[in-house]
Image (cartoon, helix red, strand yellow):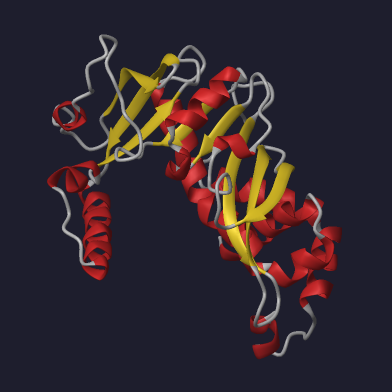
Amino acid sequence: MVRAKQAKLAQFSAVALFKRLRKSRDWLQQLCQALFEERGLQTGSPSKGGLRLIDSTLVKEPGKTGSLWRIHYSFRWPTLKCDYFKITAVEGNGNGESLRQFPLRPQDYILADRGYCQATGIHFAASKKADVMVRLNPDGIRLQTQTGAALELAQRLESITKTGQITQWEVWLPLEAHPPLAARLCVIRKSQAAAARAQKKLQRRASKQGAALQPQTLLYANYVMVLTTFPPETFPPALILESYRFRWQSNWSLSASSKSLNSAIYPSMTRKAPKLGFMANYSSLS
């Protein structure tokens, strides 16, 4: 809206914009799918029901004293249908990012970021007969070998020396009062340029926080590591990593969609709102 006004193209309110987006949702959906395919991201999926992208974002009510809320929402891919959302407080027990926030069904194939890499949530998904794919958070979850020994991740990673080299390891996720859950850790080594960017970002963040980086943290930045319970027969390692690449590339749109439409979403919160926000952001910034 600000850009349109500055360019003297149009002047309208956020509510008016949202109403126009509602009428354009089919066109925006086709446009987004074409953009994904143009970037080499296929809109198909080996699973019959497609993939389910899960995320959350913080939104603020309009006004100087507006409250801050967390929206938990999920999309179906390739339809881009928002099949669930709810609003919770930002703080407090049970309000954080977790797969427990969502109703899960058998044969759900879930993609989520590293904030959802928690043993409790992945075990919860398994209890619902749903499968999960998440970016590994080495500091947020324990991985074991079949014998119950701790997985020596840094030692394993040192064997992956070539850019683009892909490997996978069978791992088990322990959880108190539950049997260990079998999963796979799929890993690809980044290019030198991508690894350097990731390490620089970590160093900049550590400098701002006044913290010291651990050597293994810099080592992990050389790789993309995805933890999954997806069936290996249908989802080999290369497909797991490609599917997560799609999740990563769309992540900024998923997060930005609600923020950019805050004032439009609150007057008429519907299941269409997150979907429209996602499509409008992706198509305008691609």
- Residue ID at (33%, 35%): 225
Q: Is residue 36 left or right of residue 169?
A: right
Q: Residue furthest top?
A: 147
Q: Nearer the viewer, residue 262 or 95?
A: 95
Give residue 257's quadrant in the image. bottom right
Q: Taking 225 as reference, is 218 above or below it?
A: below
- Residue ID at (66%, 53%): 88
Q: Nearer the viewer, residue 270 or 166?
A: 270
Q: Quadrant of the C terminus?
A: bottom right
Give residue 127's quadrant in the image. top right
- Residue ID at (66%, 19%): 106
- Residue ID at (15%, 33%): 161
- Count of numbered circles on the image: 0
Q: Taking 261 as reference, is 224 above or below it?
A: above
Q: Is residue 3 visible?
A: yes
Q: Position of residue 200 (x, y in %)?
A: 22, 60
Q: Quadrant of the N terminus?
A: bottom right
Q: Position of residue 61 (x, y in %)?
A: 69, 71
Q: Is residue 43 left or right of residue 168?
A: right
Q: Nearer the viewer, residue 189 or 286?
A: 189
Q: Position of residue 196 (x, y in %)?
A: 21, 55
Q: Is residue 42 visible?
A: no
Q: Is residue 211 left or right of residue 226?
A: left
Q: Position of residue 261 (x, y in %)?
A: 69, 67
